[in-house]
Every structure is written in C-alpha cells, then in structure tokens.
Image (tube, helix red, strand yellow):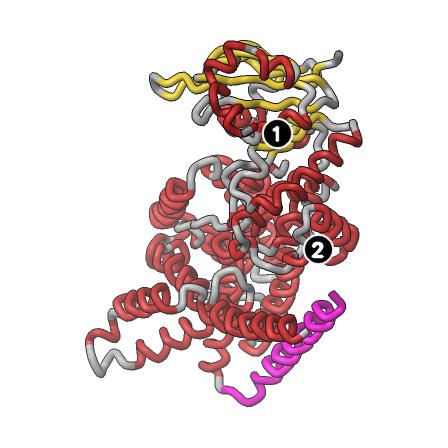
Amino acid sequence: MAFILETKDLTIRFGGHTAVDKVTVQIPEKKFTSIIGPNGAGKTTFFNLLSGQLSPTEGSIFYKGNEITKKSATERTRLGIGRSFQITNVFPNLTVLENVRLAIQSQANVRYQMLKHFLHYKRFEEKAHNILDQVLLDEKADTLASNLAHGEKRKLEIAMLLALETEVLLLDEPTAGMALEEVPAIMEVIRKIKAEEDRTIVLIEHKMDMIMDLSDEVLVLFHGELIAKGTPEEIVENETVQSAYLGGMYDEQLA
Amino acid sequence: MVLILRNMTKSNLIYLGIAALLLFLPMIITGSTKFMITQIFVFAIFAMSYDLLLGYTGIISFGHAMFFGIGAYSTAIFMDHFDSSLIALFIAILVAVLFAALVSFIVGMLTLRLKTHFYAMLTLAFAGLFLVAAEKMRWLTRGNDGFTIKAPEILRDSTTIYIISLISLVLIFFGLRRLTNSPFGRVLVAIRENEHRTESLGYNVLHYKVLVTVISGVVASLAGVLYILSLRFVNTGVFGTDLTIDVLLMTIIGGVGTLVGPIIGAALIELAHDWISGLANVHWIFERWLILYGIVYILMVIFFPLGIVGTIREKFSGRKKSKNNAKQKAS
C-alpha cells in the first residue's frame, strides 16, 4: 500500500505540556482514515502540524516521500494538503460566494492577475455555485459569511475545502455543532468523495457511527500518543482503546 | 450579473461626467480656488494610494508620507540641478517612481513579516529617517528652508497643472478600481479579512503585501510629483508625520475600503484647512486645527466607522437587502 502522508516521531510541546507525543503514522493513499480520541487528546493539534499551522518541536512529516516539515501552510496547500477548520475560519465580511470563489481562484492558479475584472472569470462563479449546491448552501450564496448560522458556516468550511480540490482532505469535525437534520447531507458529501476513490481523506470525528461507517482505518490518540490503529472493527474490540476512551461511551451510543 | 455590469457602466458614466464638469471648471474660477482644487486632486491621489493599504489590505502604515516626499524631492532636485525642460521632468518622474518602488520594496520586505502594530511603528521610523536625511543633507535639499523650483515652461500655467492633475486623478482612479476588482484585489481583501485563512488557501500573503506596498508607494510618489509641480516649492514638510495624519484622516473620514471615499475625504480636509486657517483671527483655537481634527476624528470613529461613503453605501445596500427579503416572503 502506498502512503501519501507519513509522520515520524512527531512531537509538539507547549511549555511543559506535550500535546502530541512521538506520533508515527502512515496515512494510506486514497483511503479513508479517521482519528478519534477524547477531548484534549491532541487531534486538532496533530492536524495543525500536518497542515503547517504549527511547526513541531521534534519529528518530521513526509508527503509523497518528500519531507515537508519546514514548509509553510501556503506551500502545503499548493502541494495538495487541504484542510477544514473545527473552529470556523472564513472571511466574515465577504459573501458566501466570494469565500468559495477565493478558494477556486487559488486552485485555478489565478494569483497575481491585476488587470482583468474578477467577473471576467465566469467559470469560477459557476463552479462556486456548483460546490455550494453540493453542500446545500447555494441559496445563501449572497449572504455575508458573518450572517450565517453556525451549521451553515460549517458547510461553508467544507465547500471551501472542496473548492481547493486537494489530493488530501483533512476534515476537522465537519459536523460539529450542526443541527441533527443537517448532518446526513454533509455525510452524503463526504461519502460521495470517498466513493470516487481518488482522494485521501483524514477525518476527526466524535460520532462513532459515522467513523464505523466510513473509515478504512482508525487511529486512536490519547494524551497526545497514538495508542492504537486498525480497522474500525479491530478498534472497537481493542481493549486498550476501550479502557482509555470508548469505555462505556460506545455502549451508551448503541443503546 | 448583467445587472452588476450595467450598474458599473452607469457609475463609470457618472464619474466621467463629474470629471468632464471639473475639466471646464477653470474657465469660471479664480486662481486661488483653482490652486486649491488642484491640491485636492493631488491629495485625493495620495489618499487613494493610502487606502489601498489601509482599506483594502488592512495594513496600517504611519510612514506613507515618505513615498510622497520621495516623489516631491526627486522632482524638485532634478528640476533644480538640471535645466527645467520636459526631458528633465520626465527623468525626474522616472527616478521618483523607481526610487519609491525600491524603497517600498525594501521597507515591505523588511517589515511586512511583522505583526500589524510593529509594522506601523517601523514605517514611522523609516519615514522619520527620510525626514532627518532631508534636514541634514543640506547640500542636496537645502534643509528645512526648502527651495523654489522652475517648472518647464508649459507647466507654469495653473490651468495646465489643474488639467494634468485632474487627468492623473481620473486615470489613477480607474486604474486602481480595476486593480481592486481584479482577482489580485480580491485576495487583498481576503488578507484584510482573515490573513491566516488566506494563507491556508494557498496564497503567499507576504508576496501580496509587498506588491501592494510597492504599488501604493509608486502612486503616492506620483502624487508627490504633482504636488511639487503645482506648488513649485519644496521643503521637509513633505516627509512630515502630519502629512501621514492628514492622509489617514482623509481616508477614514471619506470611507476606508472605497476609492471614492478618499477623494471626498481629501476634498473635505483641504476645504476645512482653508476655511479654518481663515478663521485664525476669530479665535486662537482655529490655529490649532489638529485639535479640531482630533475631535472630528473621534466622532467619526464612534458614529461613522465606515466613513461617509461606507455609511451611505451600507444604508443603500441595507435597503436593497430588505427589499429582496420582502420579495422572497411575497413569493
């Protein structure tokens, strides 16, 4: 199996606190990998290290076999590692359409064009509507992002990530804080990308049914350490995981 | 979409109409009014260049006067040392533009990696350096006393300068409008809104900031060139911090993040300057116009943070929005 992303002894310390502790993982290409763990286990920090928002204290990261540890977030996005943010991170005073169009413009590599009007690029507009349609947000295209409800902002996050068309998609709790009836639509979008089988998806989630359903592989973080990895079935049966994290929680969800 | 395009050509027509009216204005106004309006044109260009940083990209600079001063001194020194021919003027403008581009590039590369407030402080320091240099290099600049220059023959007529300034303003206005509406310009706005997110979308934010600083610096230096051609006198005041404060006020009062705003702001500040200094005999406070500006500035920031144009635009679009909502409800 080919690995698209690899980390080696990846560690980050904030003062005395070790948020991610010697994590060595290989993310298989074009597969669906989930990362689970209780709150504060270092999942989002791990994502921040992968996408370049933070740089590690120790250890290294490889993308397609090349080391990218020192590369900036900008460079990593251009290489093909896109991410969505758990804490919504959009352009508040721009419309939903403009938010997505900025991502499309970057993907289309129109960066320093100063002489043409942006409306000249009709295809960006069309593509943006298309993507917004997928995440069921097209009717809000002309709304300012700051006026969106929380769940809608989450959808916008996903739309912007989709617009980047990166090979790797890092999804940080895409459905967190969403109204329950909105979750299936987002699940459907994610499932569709998975079904195309040409992207690598890494997902952080708490919803176990979603993880069981979608994942090819599950990584379990606990206090910043990788304590287990395997297929969803293996993880559920893993005793270390059960005692550390799932415990009664998974049973509760089943009941 | 078609609607937007039609609206834009409509607004273009309005702007061109106003420009045409202004073109014929010199026929009916006196010399001093003509001079004042020329000053307004010059400062409008300067203020637009500042708004490119402040309003569009969200970069706060306290040293913008240095680019204005570079334009002013380059022209003055060239006119002074060489003959006052059009060729010398042309070379002077070229030197002004290139020097401003070089300085803004260096300042940008050195400081734009810093967080906003550190950047603002450093620009203040850089502008201070230029001010001190202009004061101390007396052999070149004649220090604080300044000197008068001879403009090329055909530029000595105040109407010619008026028209040249007006045409420059119109060209720069439409040029910057295209720039701010280009894909590049949209990224500038994105940087203002959320720098980190812009980075993680794959844009190299530093490149954009340096580029916009260079463009803004070059436009400011052109304003400096026009300023010297209209005044035909230069002293170290063109590097002064109060010039930066003036341009900051013009931009904020007129409306940040718009191009019409700085033009209106420039007109208001220049008119106020003129009017208030005329009242100096009435009460001493009118001589201390900075105090009055301070009050106006505080009131603006509290009650109209979007400036004149921004507030009007918001009211207008707010009305449109509620109309749309009503339509949606009706259907």
Query: Quarter-wise, where is residue B295 in the image?
Result: bottom left
Q: Can residue A77 be seen in this view?
A: yes
Q: Find residue B271 and report its horizontal and vertical position in percent.
A: 41, 77
Mark identifier at residue B48: none
Q: Label 1: chain? A: A
* Looking at the image, residue A219 lies above or below residue B5: above
Residue at (48% x, 82% y) in the render:
B31
Please check the rendered image and state whether residue B2 is part of the magenta-colored stretch, yes or no. yes
Q: Which of B21 and A214 is in front in this view?
A: A214
**Residue A134 falls within the magenta-colored stretch:** no
Does residue A124 appear to the left or right of B49 in the view shown? right
**Magenta residues, as a range?**
B1-29
Mark 1 burial class by Cα count in 10 Å: few <14, some 14-19, many 20+? few
Residue annotated with mark 1? A209
Residue picked out by circle 2: A118
- Of the 4 image quadrants, the one containing the N terminus of chain B is bottom right
Residue A9 drawn above or below residue A148? above
Give the main secondary structure of the magenta stretch. Answer: helix
